[in-house]
Image: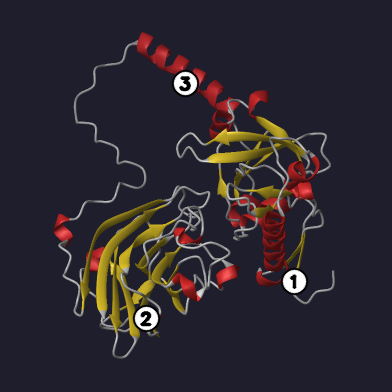
């Protein structure tokens, strides 16, 4: 038997977009085969689900992966040798007085506390979650399951934490934790814990109530001149906004940020010509996240209707084998889409270039890429809320991330249908 308690916080770069989550685990100390950017830093695509992993974990997951049958992108799961949880529940807690379920957002940027109890006699695993401000462990577990961990874990076993962010640089914080064998974990002194970094706009300082001198005519003229200069400068980054953009959820970037990220869309940041337009590499000014910005050309046959279709479609998709659309921008007829940057480029460069910079792929890599693209297609054909027909699957539209995982991109020709409808 054992018991653990810990306080954590997750701060994402955007309020509605996060990397992968955190996991508390008990297992072996060798994770040399684990992927650092995926599988919560514990496993990989080859060993996930193997009994030889000899690992138990409680995941605080902030993405939905159909590969693991995740319930949503905000859940707590109990894992045994696999990231396909034996039991999972949306993050939250049950009120001790009313019994009502209160949902918690794991990427809220607020500190939360978790309790994990394992009773060897009954093989019962119980996991509790609550806001740190509550200060007390709920009486009803959030999620529970039965599993004989004595047949899973081997001595010596180690307890610890792991996390992964994928391509979105979330910040994961462990503020304090305790652990005990054959008894309850010692209580954590909440008052002595460090604070999470401040999230959001800093409050403006109040201007002291003082008597301002009478402004002179020269001062007024100076202010007017400054205002004119600012208006002219802002017009350089003026954007277009329409009603349909409010309805759909993708994060909207300012043209100013994208202009700075790509150094003014200079040729040295040009990655190439993607579907319907040029693609530039950039780093967002605040988060330093590397992105690919597709700037749709005026000569393109992809007009505003197709642009809207791509924004609406891709902005709602969440799958590890699809290129993630992070957001978009519109300015004076210019159409811009912002994607995760795929450091290894497109698949066609490896299949047809034959250069030393892009060495030939071995069969294991090829099979993994094909399997990944197939997983993405299964998601958009069957698991998404609508059926999405890509209509432009080719090697140049399959991009490879840092771990050489295949990701399907460029949905400019995609069509949406209701399930059961006849295309």
Q: Which coloring applies here?
A: secondary structure
Q: Which residue is mark 1?
A: 418
Q: Indicate the position of residue 363 as horizontal and vertical percent values.
A: 72, 56
Q: Earlier in the sequence, mark 2 or mark 1?
A: 2
Q: Residue at x 58, y 50 (%)?
A: 403
Give the number of the mark in front: 2 or 3. 2
Q: Indicate the position of residue 234 as horizontal and vertical percent values.
A: 54, 27
Q: Which residue is mark 2?
A: 149
In terms of secondary structure, where does tag 2 sit?
Answer: helix
Query: Where, by quadrant of the figure, is residue 80 drawn?
Result: bottom left
Q: Residue at x 62, y 59 (%)?
A: 316
Q: Is residue 115 above or below residue 238?
A: below
Q: Nearer the viewer, residue 114 or 422?
A: 114
Give the number of the mark in front: 1 or 3. 1
Residue 65 seen in this snapshot: yes
**CB of mark 2 within 8 Å of CB of mark 3?**
no
In terms of secondary structure, where does tag 3 sit?
Answer: helix
Q: Residue at x 47, y 62 (%)?
A: 62
Q: Is residue 132 above or below residue 326?
A: below
Please identify the residue farthest to the top as the structure is shown.
218
Q: Indicate the position of residue 261 as horizontal and vertical percent values.
A: 55, 32
**Within 10 angstroms of label 1, few (less than 14), some, or many (20 or more) residues?**
few
**Within 10 angstroms of label 2, few (less than 14), some, or many (20 or more) residues?**
many
In terms of secondary structure, where does tag 1 sit?
Answer: loop
Q: Which mark is residue 227?
A: 3
**CB of mark 2 within 8 Å of CB of mark 1?**
no
Query: Where, by quadrant of the figure, is residue 188 drawn?
Result: bottom left
Q: Earlier in the sequence, mark 1 or mark 3?
A: 3
Mark 1 vs mark 3, CA separation in Å: 51 Å
Q: Is residue 204 above or below residue 233?
A: below
């Amino acid at each position: 038997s054992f018991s653990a308690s810990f306080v954590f916080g997750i701060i994402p770069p955007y309020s509605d977009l996060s990397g992968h989550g955190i996991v508390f685990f008990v297992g072996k100390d060798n994770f040399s085969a684990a992927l650092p950017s995926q599988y919560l830093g514990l496993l990989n695509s080859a060993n996930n689900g193997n009994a030889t992993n000899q690992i138990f974990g409680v995941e605080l997951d902030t993405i939905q992966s159909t590969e693991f049958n995740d319930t949503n992108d905000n859940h707590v799961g109990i894992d045994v040798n696999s990231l396909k949880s034996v039991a999972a529940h949306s993050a939250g807690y049950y009120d001790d007085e009313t019994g009502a379920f209160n949902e918690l957002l794991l990427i809220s940027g607020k500190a939360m506390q978790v309790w994990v109890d394992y009773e060897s006699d009954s093989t019962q695993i119980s996991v509790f979650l609550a806001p740190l401000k509550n200060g007390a462990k709920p009486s009803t577990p959030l999620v529970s399951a039965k599993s004989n961990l004595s047949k899973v874990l081997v001595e010596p076993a180690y307890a610890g934490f792991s996390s992964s962010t994928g391509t979105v640089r979330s910040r994961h914080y462990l503020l304090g934790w305790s652990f005990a064998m054959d008894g309850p974990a010692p209580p954590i002194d909440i008052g002595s814990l460090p604070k999470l970094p401040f999230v959001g706009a800093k409050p403006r300082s109040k201007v002291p109530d003082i008597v301002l001198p009478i402004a002179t005519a020269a001062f007024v003229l100076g202010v007017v001149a400054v205002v004119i200069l600012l208006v002219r400068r802002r017009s350089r980054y003026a954007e277009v906004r329409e009603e349909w953009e409010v309805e759909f959820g993708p994060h909207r970037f300012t043209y100013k940020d994208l202009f700075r990220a790509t150094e003014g869309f200079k040729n040295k940041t040009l990655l190439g010509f993607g579907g319907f337009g040029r693609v530039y590499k950039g780093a967002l000014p605040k988060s330093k996240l590397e992105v690919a910005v597709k700037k749709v050309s005026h000569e393109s046959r992809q007009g505003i209707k197709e642009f809207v279709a791509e924004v609406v479609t891709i902005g709602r998709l969440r799958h590890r084998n699809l290129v993630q659309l992070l957001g978009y921008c519109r300015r004076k007829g210019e159409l811009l889409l912002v994607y995760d940057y795929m450091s290894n480029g497109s698949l066609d460069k490896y299949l047809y270039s034959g250069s030393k910079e892009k060495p030939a792929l071995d069969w294991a890599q090829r099979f993994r890429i094909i399997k990944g693209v197939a997983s993405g297609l299964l998601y958009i054909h069957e698991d998404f809320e609508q059926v999405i027909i890509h209509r432009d699957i080719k090697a140049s539209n399959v991009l490879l991330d840092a771990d050489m995982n295949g990701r399907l991109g460029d949905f400019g020709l995609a069509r949406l249908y209701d399930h059961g409808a006849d295309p």
